[in-house]
Image (spheres, rainbow, N blue to C red):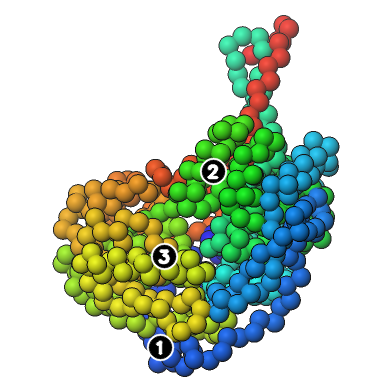
Amino acid sequence: MAARRISGLLSRSFTSGYASAFFSGGRNSSLGRGISRYSNAAAATAAEGPIIPSVAVNYTQLLINGQFVDAASGKTFPTCDPRTGEVIANVAEGDVEDINRAVSAARKAFDNGPWPKMTAYERSKIMLHFADLIEKHNDEIATLETWDNGKPYDQAAKIEVPMVARIFRYYAGWADKIHGLVVPADGQHHVQTLHEPIGVAGQIIPWNFPLLMFAWKVGPALACGNTVVIKTAEQTPLTALYAAKLFHEAGLPEGVLNVISGFGPTAGAALASHMDVDKLAFTGSTETGKVVLELAARSNLKPVTLELGGKSPFIVCEDADIDKAVELAHFALFFNQGQCCCAGSRTYVHERVYDEFIEKAKERAVKRLVGDPFKEGIEQGPQVDSEQFQKILKCIRSGIEDGATLEAGGERFGTKGYYIKPTVFSNVKDEMLIARDEIFGPVQSILKFKDYDEVIHRANNTRYGLAAGVFTQNLETANILTRALHAGTVWINCFDVFDAAIPFGGYKMSGHGREKGIYSLSNYLQVKAVVTPLKNPAWL
């Protein structure tokens, strides 16, 4: 999800509107009006057959010790096209034995291989070469990501894949700048701290941003000199395998990066509980995060970084420019089919502007173009799979049953695939399920508030604390809310502004630790104090 600030992507074309939104907080109102010209074509778009991707699926095996190999069991599982539910490819199904093989390879590469013993500069050169290869193969990777996940191709090709290259260049730059300190001590001793790689890092990534989460996890781990075993989400295994092939083409030694496709209860659990894994990082739901943390604790008490769920408030103040606020709130929720951990899924609107906001939010949702994500101009593709599709529809039914007003959407789009109409609820109450639980779909819940003390209390009254958004023209209001909201990120008059250097992580049950930026390096380092006596020192 992290963003790339390159002006070449920020053209006036519709497709690059994704890019400007990702960095600067949403499409502006003129772009929103431009989208409406596509809305009348929605029915025709749905009726047409899906575009056939022009990329071959060449990598479906596990990557262990630098080689693509079958699962030890010989099992495979299908990864499917969410546009149709049809099988794209059958992928090797990793299990306990495969995790053991991968960890063994990673351990050997760390203990005896060249990676941690290379100069940091040499490691950085390999990472930079990999970033160049990502850019070279941008279109193929973006096609695989869209095919496997369902996100709009323009989003994948113009934002996410370039961001992968940006992340690895960022961490390549850090590789030779990681160092300890000389510490003054009370007495005749020389004291220094060493920042050492932690060892074998186990990493488990989600399906909503498959390759970006690969970059967020692998980048800092490798920059610090660690080796990695990463388990992909079973819904979206293809791009990580492709990227791992490019990493070895860039000169990565065998065993440094191992990629296992498989399921959480088998491969994921084996990785989390493995006694020879020194550190674990997980991105996914809060419920699964609890299981991962318990498995890590019950095994070798390995440290765990968790980036979990969210129910982020988006607060529209009474002084807001309503047209801009509607557009930004729309982006904050519906981006990536609503499948974002930090989505602005609780839209709090001041009572003085509430009615106007509702009408315009409804209008904007109705204009949102849903369809084949490979088609130009499409804003919203399908949900990732049948399970997520059914979960979202169940949440929508719950909103209706609990008494919220359905303003738009509320049902599937078309008759094939996992498409859902952009959905807007008004008159939502805090106690309703749609205002409490993480829906992870295109469902906007709009709530009314009277004053700032009230909205601060309500916004913070959740088990989550990943992110928040504030839309106001008053600097004092912005400052008050920024400090009062219990969230790891607060965006003011913008949303989903990410950068390789900006830390990301949550309060409360949204996780432990931070990813991206300098803060993520500490996840993959041990600090060692070295104390040496001094005899007759000239100074202390």
Identified by mark 2, the residue type is Val
Marks 1 and 2 sit apart, C-alpha to C-alpha, by 43 Å
The residue beneath circle 2 is 292
**Which numbered disc flags the more N-terminal residue, 3 or 1?**
1
Check the image and report above or below for 144 versus 505: below
The residue beneath circle 3 is 391
Return the residue found at the far top: 536
Residue at 40% of width from left, 78% of height from top? 412
Marks 3 and 1 sit apart, C-alpha to C-alpha, by 26 Å
Residue at 26% of width from left, 76% of height from top? 407
Observer-nearest of 191 and 69: 69
Residue 215 image position (x, y, % from top left): 63, 56
Identified by mark 1, the residue type is Ser
Q: Secondary structure at mark 1?
A: helix
Q: Quadrant of residue 322?
A: bottom left
Observer-nearest of 504 and 431: 431
Local crowd at mark 3 within 10 Å, few (<14), some, or many (≥20)?
some
Confirm or deny contact between disc 1 and disc 2 (CB under 8 A).
no
Identified by mark 3, the residue type is Lys
Residue 354 image position (x, y, % from top left): 20, 69
Q: Quadrant of residue 52?
A: bottom right
